[in-house]
Amino acid sequence: MEGNKSFRIPQSDYPRIVIIGGGFAGVQMAKKFANKAVQVILFDRHNYHTFQPLLYQVATAGLEPDAIAGPLRKLLDNSKNIFFRMATVSQIYQDRNTVFTDKGTIEYDHLIIACGSKTNFFGNSDKFEKAFPLKQIPQALDLRSHILQNLEQAVLSSDEEEISKLLNIVIVGGGPTGVEVAGAFGELKKHVLPNDYPDLDLNQMNIYLVEGLPRLLSGMSDFANEKSQKYLKKFDVHVMLKTMVKSFDGDRVVFDNDDTLSTNTLVWAAGVMGNVILGLPEESVFKSRYKVDSFNKVLNTDNIYAVGDIAHMETEKFPKGHPMLAPVAMQQGENLANNLLNSFQNKPSKPFKYKDRGSMATIGRNKAVVDLPKNMHFGGFFAWFVWMFVHLVSIIGFRSKLVVLTNWIWNYFTYDRGTRLIIRPFLPSQLGNLKKQELGQK
Amino acid sequence: MEGNKSFRIPQSDYPRIVIIGGGFAGVQMAKKFANKAVQVILFDRHNYHTFQPLLYQVATAGLEPDAIAGPLRKLLDNSKNIFFRMATVSQIYQDRNTVFTDKGTIEYDHLIIACGSKTNFFGNSDKFEKAFPLKQIPQALDLRSHILQNLEQAVLSSDEEEISKLLNIVIVGGGPTGVEVAGAFGELKKHVLPNDYPDLDLNQMNIYLVEGLPRLLSGMSDFANEKSQKYLKKFDVHVMLKTMVKSFDGDRVVFDNDDTLSTNTLVWAAGVMGNVILGLPEESVFKSRYKVDSFNKVLNTDNIYAVGDIAHMETEKFPKGHPMLAPVAMQQGENLANNLLNSFQNKPSKPFKYKDRGSMATIGRNKAVVDLPKNMHFGGFFAWFVWMFVHLVSIIGFRSKLVVLTNWIWNYFTYDRGTRLIIRPFLPSQLGNLKKQELGQK
């Protein structure tokens, strides 16, 4: 294909594959395409891959970002045919085989959409502007600083109403993320904060996990639901089932029965939706995901594919589409990459078949739940150990594995959380003011 | 002393010591006062202590903040008579024995000012508003993201002028910080970036170290000066001596001979000045530092002390005041804490005497310079090893030592810099826009 000027991509005799998104699926595919007879351009708006399953540990002061973020250029170091470009894709022009980004346009032979999902406020994002979503690293860091600032502020207050507003934490969504965040805050309250804040009455800190359904972890077994509720109770987390939130103004939450609760911390873990890009026909989109066939090809297109959270693939086993999970994304990425490479050699393609290896959630030290295929379930210390092992193995990059492992060992034995730092950025504008202040102080 | 309402400090029969600042001196003293017959209130605007000597490694993607920042509450965990309060002190009312902060006021029996230094623009801060100072963690993170963003931008550009603006780095100030920053960027350019950016011509990246004096490391030996210049040359750093900068507008630097250089990165390491607080008589201040006697007592006061960078102590050996260095701060803190504890038992006080154990600077892997007392100097691998050992031992907190050590080992053997992540915060305002964008994309 011809070279590209905006992105300084050289001319190549190989077919050009453009991948949008460096998440689980995108990285998996780029690695598969490395040093093969294709030219690959990988776009992401960040210069790193985020290991989202551990994002909640950044938010709860257990890990620093480098533990769960891998620089994309490092991950693709040894592949001369893969070009990473930091850019945000804004539109797809199907009839011109072109994508538009904030940094320029580029033509493709094959386009793979792997841009994942974003926080879903179910049409009420204006009522939850002050909520803390938990999909990206800056959001996790923001939540960490917010919680710690609240604690420092609470130490200074003698107003009971203000103190409970500062200390209460409401988590919306009883899926794995909600359960893990709630458990991690419970652990902080029980094991870390009493040493740090001897002059604070931590009984005034209440952690609520709010879920609309009558159970937690709805994608998992009854065993996992019951066990996780039991574990959360041990960490003093109040589980509120069959409850919805109506609004949050930064000072109080309103529930669907019009009860209110005083808090300035509402963590939104209630759901995600596809990150659909402008340009493809409406009929190709179903509930903010691209409809794909069993080869991950988007409906009504010839050379456009979608994988992972953004793909809606209905099969006999998954009549409502596949779950939005990392293993699905990775397996779809691998299958699609193989199919494309095979097709260039006129070999046949294989339809995607999800291998479900089970699901799990951790609540805190020594406490997790694991569902395996064939109705096997277990909890407790062994589940927690399996959870850690599987996550360690899944993290991309040896350095991140090492950082996570040493942090976990440290946190486990010391009951410490080393990253409880309130780090707020200097903005250019603030910096100006700061300098003026400093000057004023002479 | 009576209790204090704004800070919820209980009543105590012991004298109350208020310490402003949790830097080297402040933490040293708080540890000395732990579980002694005093009540101590420690103020800091951050909730962590910063190990400033390694700040430059955060800016150059070698370390994450948790490596060099220790939560103050953790450092003071086991001392029931020490109360940490996150607040910024705005004024001292000497005649009322009171300090004013942004969170309330408090009375003291003894006041210790240990608030350190801040960036000194020598009256030209308006001409360097776009410069990157390097005194605090958010500044270091900002610089890290800025450099990496420039690199990503340069990959997309074919405009030679724009590329050199994006890649050039100018560091102002040839003291230890300037030398260490320049060396670290040189190392990045030589060992890390070639793998990451194969499509970038790194010869277009020029690193300049600008110093007004005819030499580098003016506080150190001639040997250190010569050796460090030699080492910097090996990392392709252009050392510009007898040169000053006049202004920087974010696009180009103007030098004192009216030469200009195209760059959007100017790191300001040219000097620091005391962080003087309003309220004490003008006669007690000399060049933005408090004049203190050899017991660190501020002139014209009875019960106010200053230690570390903020203290100007003239002695026979130091007729122009002591150097603004961490060892001075720690030793002054220790001596003052001992003197105060002794005075409560009517024991005599000892004047401060600085034990100079030498000074050093590192330029990069295997390259450092060390000056020891009695005119002993050495460089090379052994100096680099000593530099690392001394810094490791000096970092407060075992966890930070461990994090720094493992990162150093990793970085040394892999030539990797794991934290090259562009992490920009979400601001509440941006978050609003982001949500609107997401909604717009439906």
Image (cartoon, coloured by chain):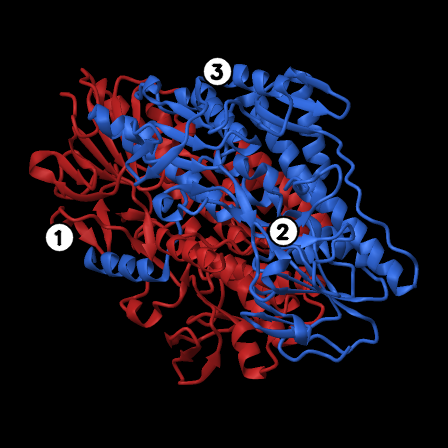
Chain colours: A blue, B red
Q: CA distance from mark 3 to mark 1?
A: 60 Å
Label 2 sits on residue: A310
Q: In the image, what residue type sits under mark 2?
A: Ile
Label 2 or label 1, whichever lies nearer to me, is 2
Residue at the spot of label 3: A233
Q: Please name whichever residue, A116 or A28, is drawn nearer the observer in this view of the structure.
A: A116
In this picture, is B292 found above or below A36?
Answer: above
Which class describes the residues within 10 Å of circle 2: few (<14), some (14-19), or many (20+)? Answer: many
Q: Position of residue B413 (x, y in %)?
A: 73, 48
Q: Are marks 3 and 2 on the same chain?
A: yes
Q: Please give left or right for residue B381 compared with residue A217 in the image.
A: right
In the rendered image, residues at marks 3 and 1 fall on the same chain: no
In the image, what residue type sits under mark 1? Glu
Decide if residue B221 is in sight here. no
- Which chain letter goes with mark 3? A
Q: Are marks 2 and 1 in contact (CB under 8 Å)?
A: no
Left or right: residue A226 versus residue B270 is: right
Give coordinates of residue A291: x percent, y percent: 66, 53
Mark 3, secondary structure of its residue: helix
Dot 3 and dot 2 residues touching (CB under 8 Å): no
